[in-house]
Amino acid sequence: MSKKPRPLPLDVEPHSGPRIAHTTEVLAADVLLERALDVEARAAKRRSVRHFSRQPVPRAVVESLIRTASSAPSGANMQPWTFVAVASADLKRQIRAAAETEERQTYASRMSDEWRDALHHIGTNWRKPFLEDAPWLVIVFVQRHGIAPDGSKIRHYYAKESVGIAAGTFIAAAHELGLATLTHTPSPMAFLSKLLGRPSNESAFLLMPLGWPTDDCSVPDLQRKSLDQIAHVFVDGDQP
Ligand SMILES: Cc1cc2nc3c(=O)[nH]c(=O)nc-3n(C[C@H](O)[C@H](O)[C@H](O)COP(=O)(O)O)c2cc1C
């Protein structure tokens, strides 16, 4: 008896799993633009902060921000991220010491002249006091693959892209609350896996201090690129 041929993957029914309704409020064009400009104005105020006050941020707020970050889209919905939130003074001290050890070497000898020049206007150096001052350090790990209950590997798709989007969602949500973050990448970051006891399928992706800026906090006077520099728009003649 001949077997029935399996359908080509292209022919598989796209809506194979259970589904739920999803709707959103469609705003009138003028309201839409007003809201867009309002969101833009608030986003424009986000800055990377390197001077944090020691004023605390409640744990429940940090947990909420992590849940918000975890609402990000991810390749095949694998949600390939782990957020580690540290408020322990001792652990922050250890993270600062390890980060400064790496950064000292990076600034002294690992960094190319080109990289050093590109950073000059920001005014960073190997010292990272904010790693102890900020009430929280939120470290985002990328799970290069998942691990099934039987120990086998679960493949993750676009893991880094997904974690980048989740981190961006976290930063934007924190900013909405008036909280400051820094997207910090002490290089190399392997010490974070060790200090925080993360498994071998995870790599540190970003270290984000989270808290309030100091009263006298200043940031570099940076220019953002104009729309003309970053966007190309194709429209039909009748499009508003
Ligand atoms: C992937 C990434 C890595 C970064 N690493 C560092 C870092 O290690 N240390 C630091 O002080 N800033 C770091 N930054 C922050 C950038 O310097 C900052 O975003 C940029 O200068 C623009 O400033 P703004 O965030 O205030 O708009 C990093 C930003 C990104 C997106």
Image (cartoon, grey):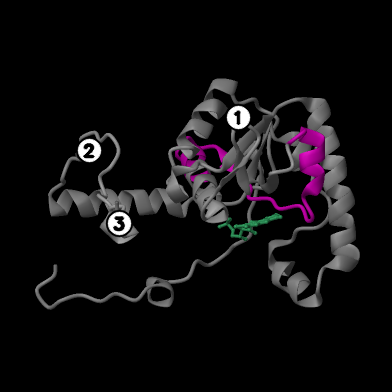
Residue 179 lies within the magenta run: yes
Looking at the rendered structure, the kind of residue marked 1 is Pro
Is residue 208 placed above or below 86 in the rendered structure?
below
Q: CA distance from mark 1 to mark 3?
A: 33 Å
Secondary structure found at label 2: loop
Among numbered discs 1 and 3, the one appearing first in the sequence:
3
Q: Quadrant of the C terminus?
A: bottom left
Residue 17 in the figure: left or right of residue 227: left
**Magenta part of the chain:** 171-198
Q: Nearer the viewer, mark 1 or mark 2?
A: 1
Residue 83 in the figure: left or right of residue 41: right
* Whether the residue under disc 3 has CB within 8 Å of ligand 1: no
Between 217 and 67, which is closer to the camera in this rendering?
A: 67
Among numbered discs 2 and 3, the one appearing first in the sequence:
3
> Residue 203, position in %: x, y?
70, 47
> Residue 57, position in %: x, y?
60, 26
**Tag 2 and tag 3, C-beta contact below 8 Å:** no
Q: Residues within 10 Å of mark 3 (few under 14, many from 20)?
A: few
Which disc is residue 113 wearing?
A: none
Looking at the rendered structure, the kind of residue marked 2 is His
Is residue 207 placed above or below 21 in the rendered structure?
below
Which residue is identified by label 2?
Answer: 22
Q: Nearer the viewer, mark 2 or mark 3?
A: 3
Secondary structure found at label 1: loop
Which residue is identified by label 3?
Answer: 5
Q: Residue at x 63, y 47 (%)?
A: 182
Secondary structure found at label 3: loop
Which residue is identified by label 1?
Answer: 149
